[in-house]
Amino acid sequence: MFKKGCGNIMPTLSKLSKAFLLPIALLPIAGVFLGVGSAIASNSSADSFGYFFGTLLNKMGDVCFGNLPVLFCISVALAYTKDSGIAAITAVVGFLVMNGMQAALLHTQTLSINESNLWVNVLTESGQDSWKQFTWVVDGKIDWANAAIHLESIAGWGIGTDASNLTMVNSNFELIDGAGSVYYSLLWINKIPNGLITSNIGINSLNTGVFAGIFVGAIAAKCYNKYHQTQLPSAISFFSGTKLVPIVTFVAVIPLSFIFMFIWPYIGMGLAAFGQASGKLPGGLDSFIYEVAERSLVPFGLHHVFYAPLWWTNAGGSIAEAFNSATKAQQDAFVEIWIKNHDAAALGLTNVTFESIRTLISRDYTDLWQSMGDQTMAYKVIANTKVLNFTDLEALGLNIGRFQSGKFGFMLLGLPMAGLAMWLNVPKENRKEVMGIYFSAAFTCFLTGITEPIEYTFLFLAPWLFYGVHMPLAAISFLFAGLFKTHVSMTVSGGFIDYIVFGVIPYFGSKAMSAKSAFAILGVSAAMAPAYFFGFYFAVKYGNVMVPGRDGSSNVQLATKAEYKASKGLNVDGSKIEDGKSTKASAKDAVEEGRIQKATKIIEFLGGEANIVDVDACASRLRLTVKDGSLVDKDGIISLGGATGALIRGTNVQVVYGGEQEAIKPRMIKILDEQRKSKK
């Protein structure tokens, strides 16, 4: 029973993980525009061409990060419906409906507290702190004494007449005196903290990060799969089939809206509490624990699911919460650092205090103020370095990048050195022949952060290398990155390209971080290089791991058989290319024929057409769902070449190719369609 349950849940989670890759794929180019645009704008005078051009690039990149929820909504719908465009547009409809309902339910709330019509206004849809909306604001400042007198004389709350030293200090809107005594908490007026209200594609609604989008996308996919072929009675037949899907989804998201309205504030506050508590762990321990969990899920392709809440919800931290929960010492340190980093006069601040800075950000930079999640906050800070940077927030105890920066430590040099160590374990007579494989995989890891060609080389040969050597070293890399407070963000990979975009450019361009933050990660990487090299060299040598080339075999290559034959002027069967036919065209035909043959053989090794339920692919794997996993011939699939390993969990099958899967997937789908049509 347990095995059956795991077999069913693995394909579901696998598809969810794959769904995350679609919006994530947009982030690298968006990050380039964001970082470069911010650098240009920050180094250009106001109203100059450079300023407007930089701002243009900045906003082009920022819009992707600001709309991740709806992008996730669409990608989840696509992932569970075999890339149906109808499901995608239905998901958008559902997302709009859900947020529209929330906007209506979060409308301005008012509470009468005296007979002379004195009101406390909670304008939640404004996205601003409720304390700014009190009717006893005089010349833009709160008259606390007047407020206290009214509250005491009318409501009998016992604040006292001498209220000149009353202040509001945290997100609970508590009035306190100089001794720290709490007189009255206004939390009950606004049940939903302001940090949980934001603008979703122009609609002020709950700030659920990407979670609401994921749920709506799943509902849209479910409605599509169930109703897209439904035939209604003739009188209303116009609404049959795909036209029925958005209608059903429209209704289906209504209960979801109510569920989020009543439950999400508590979940959001719980995530915020988790984010604050984890951020207080000593010496980078939070980063260490994160990487142990994240890396352990890589073999199953589920790591994207794990880091979603930490990157895109307040479980990974919140700028508003950092301000609202800051101690007096943190506030003083923040102000001192902020004055050094920013031009207060240019921002319109004549009296620089913690409250004035907080007011400025929450009022004029709402996207920055409401940002939450380790990655989202990083992008928003890079986009708004004029008013806030990583060093400022560090003073408030917010270590942005704690769930990202550590990846650079083993991507840039760690895993490439592991590849070198494995290559040096190959007999000298075979090293030259396999050098290209190891060099290509190592360089790919360094440049782009794609690790699976290296990771899966030893994962499937000796899993203990992954869990016993690689995972602990990766976690140590995160530990050091968190300890040194390296605030370098990334898209999803952590390679050299990401380092340039989110480390070098923000430092030299917009001064988003200190030199220590920008370059300490290189020190971490340098330290991890020998650790990975010696760890893997001796583990492979004395563990007798037969890495590619070590077993004496000379037939070790990444190219497909068809591509190799074509490069030699031969057809797939070994015969020479026909005279009179261009070599280029013949080689192309040979490659295509080889891919068709390979896709056909994969279907055969999966147990045949009847055993295959679904064919999909992600960044580096062919992801398949079968009826009976025991019918899959894993060794047969690997023998076809190109794959570095295969994983079977119940009805879920994953074959690691590192890029070729994108060519295999459409051909398998086409062949399966032809086979199924021929049986009808």
Image: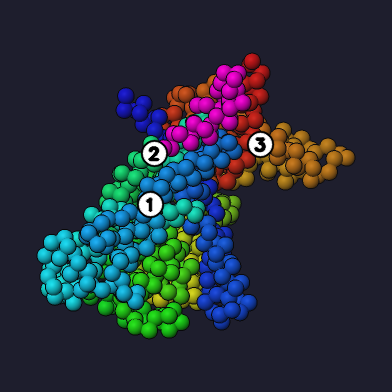
x, y percent for residue 414? 43, 60
Relative to residue 82, is residue 680 drawn left or right? Answer: right
- Magenta segment: 226-254
Q: Which residue sits furthest top?
A: 680
Q: Is residue 645 above or below residue 397?
A: above
Of pointers 2 and 1, the one earlier in the residue sequence:
1
Q: Residue at x 70, y 40 (%)?
A: 591
Q: Look at mark 2 in the image and give the residue it sits on.
A: 256
Near mark 3 (Cα within 10 A), the count class, few <14, some 14-19 or many ≥20, is many
Q: Please tell me whether residue 268 is drawn above or below residue 330 in the rendered image.
A: above
Identify the residue at horizontal 37%, vertical 50% (top origin).
106
Residue position for label 3: 595
Residue plotted at (45% across, 46% down): 100
Quadrant of res 464? top left
Find residue 107 and name its label. Answer: 1
Looking at the rendered image, the quarter that the N terminus falls into is top left
* SS category of the residue bearing label 2: helix
Is the residue marked by circle 1 packed among few (<14), some (14-19), or many (20+) residues within 10 Å?
A: some
